[in-house]
Amino acid sequence: MSAGYIDEMHEAFHSDLVYRSEDIPLECSPRPKEMEQTLHGVMKLNGLVIRSLEEIAGRGANAVTYRAGKKFGHEVAKYFQKREDVEGALHELSDLLRGQYSFEVWKPEDKETFIIEENGETFIYLVFHDCIVRQTLRRNGLEQGGPLCQTLFGYVVGAIEEITGRKAKLEIVHTGPNACLKKLILK
Amino acid sequence: MEIHVDTDACVGCGLCVKDCPMHVYELQNNVSVAVRPNNCMGCLSCHEICPAQALEHRGIYAARRHYIDIKVCEMLRKVV
Ligand code: SF4
Ligand code: SF4
């Protein structure tokens, strides 16, 4: 992956902000004034749909939402330029997700490159920063990593497959209130 | 990323050590120490789990927040 692209990406997610545990956010950012009711309505509705789906379909709910997301990813990415390189595909993907999700490629300090080969797997770590799914789950008091997250997983996998023509898989490594770490496994 | 642990507040429970997927913290003399701050990807789950609110991250990207309940915030503003 080119250094310029990585630097640009990392710069976008760096700040001088000091974040303390006791900081209670008192307002949404950016201010949602105009669309607050709509946004919260949609989030509540999504939360209810997911909760009901889980109640009825149990663990099968994940398969349903993953498939729905994947179809959507394929559908949307169909209109994007096809390319074989993963870096280009991730660029396209961030355009595709803009406004709802933002992510950066990431690596632990002991790794030399962003494309990591380990235990016979080739993968890239992605840190998802802004994520409407996380907001929805927290708004509804639901756990992260469940069926609604699977929709995003499917969406990313579908889009990457459509753009690169390569099979891919996304695994969740860790979820947090401010970011989630995912592993994009390339096949 | 700079991570500061308030050593007066930290109760040495080790929850942050167990929770962090990147093994950023270690307990040393019953206090958490950020030994690998560059491995932090900013998830802030350690903030959520720390019972003493002893942690501070500097240089973090704060994700957009849409889940704040405005009515609750209005009430909070009156008391905070
Ligand atoms: S923010 Fe996440 S990655 Fe960083 S130290 Fe805390 S738990 Fe570890
Ligand atoms: S979770 Fe908080 S109190 Fe417990 S060891 Fe970590 S910093 Fe200290």
Image (cartoon, rainbow, N blue to C red):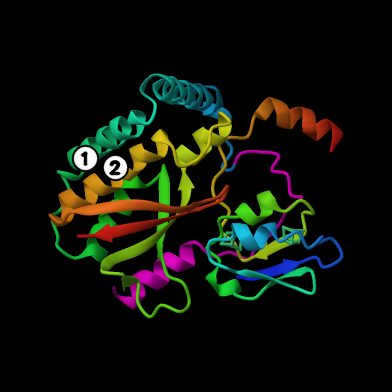
In the image, the segment drawn in magenta is A1-28
- Which amino acid lies under the numbered mark 1 shown in the image of this protein? Val
Tell me if label 2 and label 1 are in contact, CB under 8 Å.
yes
Q: Nearer the viewer, residue B1 or B17?
A: B17
Q: Is residue A15 magenta?
A: yes
Q: Which residue is at a point 27% across and 66% down the rendered structure image?
A: A121
In the drawing, does residue B4 fall left or right of residue A114?
right
In the drawing, does residue A59 fall left or right of residue A161?
right
Chain letter for mark 2: A
User: Which badge, 2 or 1, comes first in the chain's sequence?
Assistant: 1
Say whether residue A17 is visible. no
Give x and y (percent) for residue A152. Answer: 35, 41
The residue carrying mark 1 has its beta carbon less than 8 Å from ligand 1: no
Q: Locate ligand 2 by image quadrant.
A: bottom right
Q: Nearer the viewer, residue B45 or A33?
A: B45
Say whether residue A52 is visible. yes
In the drawing, does residue A53 fall left or right of residue A166?
right
Q: Is residue B72 above or below residue A119?
A: above
Chain letter for mark 1: A
State the quadrant of the C terminus of chain A: bottom left
Q: Where does label 2 land, which residue?
A: A155
Q: Which residue is at a point 68% across and 57% down the rendered structure image?
A: B15
Q: Nearer the viewer, residue A27 or A143?
A: A143
Give x and y (percent) for residue A97. Answer: 34, 46
Q: Is residue B7 magenta?
A: no
- Label 2 environment density (alpha carbons within 10 Å; few <14, some 14–19, many ≥20): many
| Label 1 secondary element | helix
Q: Where does label 1 land, which residue?
A: A76
Q: Is residue B8 above or below residue A59?
A: below
- Label 1 environment density (alpha carbons within 10 Å; few <14, some 14–19, many ≥20): some
| Label 2 secondary element | helix
